[in-house]
């Protein structure tokens, strides 16, 4: 098994993704077409753009793709390919890069959950793939989940026609397993809350011959998570493509056992009469996801981390310069594991609520999006363009000072 250093060294020798499929048509098109001025579509439509000091939220359109990803998407848009062949080749490359048996590009992490679940239920039986979720004859119908791991995204499991069985302890999990049990599902960021941790969860699945699925949608960085959980023994793992990997927002990765990925593909487009026919991922997103992953693996992650830390410190120092303001720099344990800032203040000294401050930041020029609750304004910088932290720091300091009177 190659180590990370060997992997990154190997990436440097890989051809640009376009080299897999030929580039003559693209080159001819590029030579013939003069550069056109870029239209300001959002301005034309009256849609406000903003500085993202919040993070990789779907409602805030996730992340910004890097130039290499945009190049791959533009390249893919110029030519026709067979969709299954593209998924085959890209899946092989991705699996090699992240040390998995197999991989596929999906229409986001939720799509990966539906496809992975469907693959577990149907195997390579096309007739079963045609029947779920409405006709479950001869198909296992229960997925076991820890009560603390319930989340709105598990609707993607229920889309396949199964019932979620909640448990709390390992003993309850063993007792709940029966002939109807299809899969054990795990929400990665809930690991600290659940009583059944990684190793025991996997061991129970292997003991009973039941596939285990780990939802790691927002759990990059660190980069090692891309292979940590499959190497740990989870049969399926999924990641969002449009968060830390900075790929297309409507793309994701499903990694894991070769037989289960093949079965997931049976339930995926271009096959029509399946539960996941709506989960189409196009050639542009498939190639864009590969380019994003290659770029992410080749990055200097230590340098990225130092940049985020310096940006967070700059905003923290500006906010805490206001009398009555306290700041806390922290790193979430699992999901969105990046330097983050929590800003609190004495509202008897500073007459503005966190929600009011967020709203003023949002409605200013430029607009700035932040998160938090009733007690604080919370900020991350990893989705900012370098230099935007100075705008955010200045605006927060000015608004807090104004509210302090």
Image: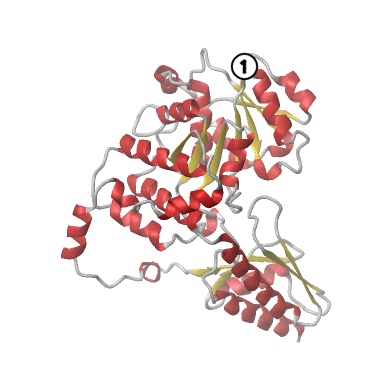
Q: How many marks?
A: 1
Residue in view at x 35 percent, y 44 percent: 282
Q: Nearer the viewer, residue 178 or 2?
A: 2
Q: Residue at x 39, y 53 (%)?
A: 13
Considering depth in this image, is 81 or 10 the residue closer to the camera?
Answer: 10
In this rendering, position of residue 25 left or right of residue 262: left
**Percent position of residue 177, x then y:** 69, 19
At a point 39% along the width and 59% down the height, the residue shown is 68
Residue matched to label 1: 180
Q: Judge whether 209 appears above or below 246 on screen.
A: above
Q: If the image is split into quadrants, where does the N terminus sit?
A: top right
In which quadrant of the rendered image does the C terminus lie?
A: bottom right
Which residue is more in the foreground, 14 or 370?
14
Query: To which quarter of the image does residue 275 belong?
Result: top left
Secondary structure under tag 1 reads loop
**In the displayed structure, does residue 375 sit left or right of residue 227?**
right
**Residue 49: percent from left, percent from top:** 48, 69
Relative horizontal placement of residue 323, taking residue 161 as reference (left or right): right
Vertical placement of residue 136 versus 325, above or below = above
């Amino acid at each position: 098994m190659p180590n990370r250093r060997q992997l990154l060294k190997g990436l440097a020798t890989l051809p640009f993704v376009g080299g897999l499929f030929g580039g003559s048509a693209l080159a001819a098109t590029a030579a013939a077409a003069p550069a056109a001025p870029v239209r300001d579509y959002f301005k034309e439509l009256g849609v406000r753009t903003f500085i993202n000091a919040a993070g990789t939220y779907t409602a805030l359109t996730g992340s910004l793709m890097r130039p290499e990803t945009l190049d791959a998407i533009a390249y893919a848009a110029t030519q026709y390919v067979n969709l299954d062949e593209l998924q085959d080749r890209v899946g092989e490359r991705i699996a090699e890069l992240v040390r998995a048996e197999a991989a596929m590009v999906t229409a986001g992490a939720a799509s990966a959950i539906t496809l992975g679940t469907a693959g577990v239920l149907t195997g390579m039986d096309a007739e079963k793939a045609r029947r779920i979720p409405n006709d479950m004859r001869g198909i296992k119908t229960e997925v076991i989940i820890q009560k603390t791991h319930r989340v709105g995204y598990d609707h993607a499991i229920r889309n396949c026609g199964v019932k979620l069985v909640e448990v709390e302890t390992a003993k309850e999990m063993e007792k709940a397993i029966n002939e109807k049990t299809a899969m054990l599902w795990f929400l990665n960021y809930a690991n600290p809350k659940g009583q059944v941790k990684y190793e025991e969860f996997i061991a129970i699945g292997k003991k009973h011959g039941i596939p285990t699925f780990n939802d790691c949608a927002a759990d990059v960085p660190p980069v090692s998570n891309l292979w940590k959980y499959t190497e740990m023994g989870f049969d399926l793992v999924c990641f969002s493509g449009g968060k830390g990997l900075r790929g297309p927002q409507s793309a994701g990765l499903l990694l894991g056992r070769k037989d289960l990925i093949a079965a997931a593909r049976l339930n995926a487009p271009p096959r029509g009469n399946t539960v996941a026919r709506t989960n189409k991922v196009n050639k542009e997103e498939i190639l864009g996801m590969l380019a994003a992953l290659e770029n992410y693996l080749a990055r200097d992650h230590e340098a990225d981390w130092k940049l985020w830390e310096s940006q967070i410190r700059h905003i923290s120092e500006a906010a805490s310069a206001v009398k009555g303001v306290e700041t806390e720099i922290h790193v979430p344990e699992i999901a969105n594991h990046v330097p983050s800032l929590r800003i609190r203040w004495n509202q008897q000294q500073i007459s503005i609520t966190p929600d009011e401050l967020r709203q003023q930041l949002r409605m200013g020029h430029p607009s700035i999006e932040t998160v938090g609750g009733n007690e604080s304004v919370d900020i991350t910088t990893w989705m900012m363009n370098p230099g935007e932290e100075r705008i955010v720091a200045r605006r927060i300091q000015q608004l807090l000072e104004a509210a302090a009177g």
